[in-house]
Amino acid sequence: MATTGTGVTRTDGVHARLREDILSGVLPPGQRLKFPELCRRYDTSVGAAREALTRLASAGLVRSQAHQGYVVTPLSVEDLAELTVARVEIECLVLRMAISEGDVRWEADAIAAHHLLERAPYLDPDNPARSTGEWAAAHTAFHEALLAGCGNRRLREVANGLRDEAELYRQWSITPAQAKGRDVGAEHRAILAAVITREADLAVRLLGEHISMTTRLLRDAAEA
Amino acid sequence: MATTGTGVTRTDGVHARLREDILSGVLPPGQRLKFPELCRRYDTSVGAAREALTRLASAGLVRSQAHQGYVVTPLSVEDLAELTVARVEIECLVLRMAISEGDVRWEADAIAAHHLLERAPYLDPDNPARSTGEWAAAHTAFHEALLAGCGNRRLREVANGLRDEAELYRQWSITPAQAKGRDVGAEHRAILAAVITREADLAVRLLGEHISMTTRLLRDAAEA
DNA sequence: AGTGAACCAACTTTCGAAAGTTGAGCCAAC
DNA sequence: GTTGGCTCAACTTTCGAAAGTTGGTTCACT
């Protein structure tokens, strides 16, 4: 990644790295983000860090309180429930539109994204307690590809934004042990199949269950 | 408005005023927002203006391009069509949830908001070519009150955010002449009535038509 | 001992100037 | 006459230090 390429500002770089560190779990939820520390960590100035945080705040990844600084968005079971309902409603809506509008090119892209996901390693060989960033990226890409058939940019952005927020929960609450009792691959295959055959009702039902399933595991984990 | 009250930063003030100026039409769509000018206008520094713009950008009210500054989001017929579809889908979804979840207190608040809307003056006596800010505020409050019955904060925020964006279009495209051939008051009354009697299907249909109607007028205006 | 006010340190917010980038206008060369 | 590169001005971006705010701690007083 270029330090100062064309059409890219320094703030963009800090924003991207900070975002990555939050989503990958380097900066845990609830973590206070102090400017002196951030400036050292990302070798930047207060202003740049501030703008990056402002952007992340409106994406819901960090929270700010006047004169008390920024914090990585804390997790709570109630918030997870709310987020899940919102995701199910909106992602299903967008998927339905995608199935209705999408062309063959969209189908091809979805199949390609699914192939990459199936080939991505799930567990980190170095740290088997957590899934790899590679898998997470492929997973996000697959779900985005499914929704890409919907021509409405705003609806896609809303759906993808909510999924981003949910990523925080997944990263911190799912343990491989829980994932074991579940065949995520089969869920993805089933969704893809229904999408390709344009069985909208089925695809939407499967996607809704897929999203809710993740949430149920997280909730159980929180109680334990 | 306090210059530096408790829990309020200077940036918040600039953000609020800038937002107001954009939504009320003082700063027209496509208008370039240069920092030297903004600093004079709002008596502030570059940094504060920058942060305010960053926030407005993620709300969709302004657009930024690296090294080329900020611009009030330009209007286009295609974008309006997209925005409208998104609004109909999501506002109807949220309204349906509100009707299903809302309690008596919610009904009362909606009725109150509607009363204020009916009593708000529509046309500005000084400038009859544009509707009053007072009416716009009451209109927004009414629609937010309708959705307030939905307990899901995220879904409400998405719906309200999209309506904010649409406000830009209304402000710039609706002329009183067009509004004449339409009884907006009747539309609002009908929606409210269906909501109170909990006729979800009817309420959702009416709201969808209400949103689309505004859009159709705007589109016709754009063609002329 | 308990209460409350004043102090202090760490941090957030704000500022204005320096550095870097873009696009346009101008001039020379073909 | 047209194309290509160069220069300049206006603006955006970045920086680091000054100003302001918060929460905690200490110390005097009841």
Image: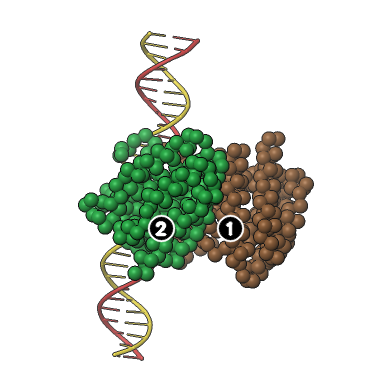
Chain colours: A green, B brown, C yellow, D red
Q: In this rendering, which labeled residue sits more in front, label 2 or label 1? A: 2
> Looking at the image, which residue is at 78% across and 47% down?
B181
In the rendered image, residue A33, in percent from the top left (x then y), is placed at 33, 58
The amino acid on which the numbered mark 2 sits, given as a three-letter code, is Thr
Residue A152: which quarter of the image? top right
In the drawing, what numbered circle is on residue B223? Answer: none
Chain of residue at mark 1? B
Regarding residue A189, the answer to whether it shows in the image is yes
CA neighbours of label 2 inside 10 A, class few (<14), some (14 to 19), many (20+) = many
Q: Secondary structure at mark 2?
A: helix
Chain of residue at mark 2? A
Regarding residue B138, the answer to whether it shows in the image is no
**Circle count:** 2
Q: Nearer the viewer, residue A76 or B13?
A: A76
Query: Can you identify the residue that label 2 sits on?
Result: A214
In the rendered image, residue C16, in percent from the top left (x then y), is placed at 38, 48
Residue occupying the far right of the picture: B181
Q: Nearer the viewer, residue A203 or C29?
A: A203
In the rendered image, residue A9, in percent from the top left (x then y), is placed at 37, 41
Q: Quadrant of the C terminus of chain B?
A: top right
CA neighbours of label 1 inside 10 A, class few (<14), some (14 to 19), many (20+) = many
> Looking at the image, which residue is at 44% across and 54% down?
A210
Q: Nearer the viewer, residue A62 or A144?
A: A144
> Looking at the image, which residue is at 35% across and 53% down?
A23
Q: Secondary structure at mark 1?
A: helix
In the drawing, what numbered circle is on residue B94? Answer: 1
Left or right: residue B218 compared with residue A169: right
The amino acid on which the numbered mark 1 sits, given as a three-letter code, is Val
Asked if disc 2 and disc 1 are in contact, CB closer than 8 Å, the reply is: no
The answer to whether A141 is drawn above or below residue B115 in the figure is above
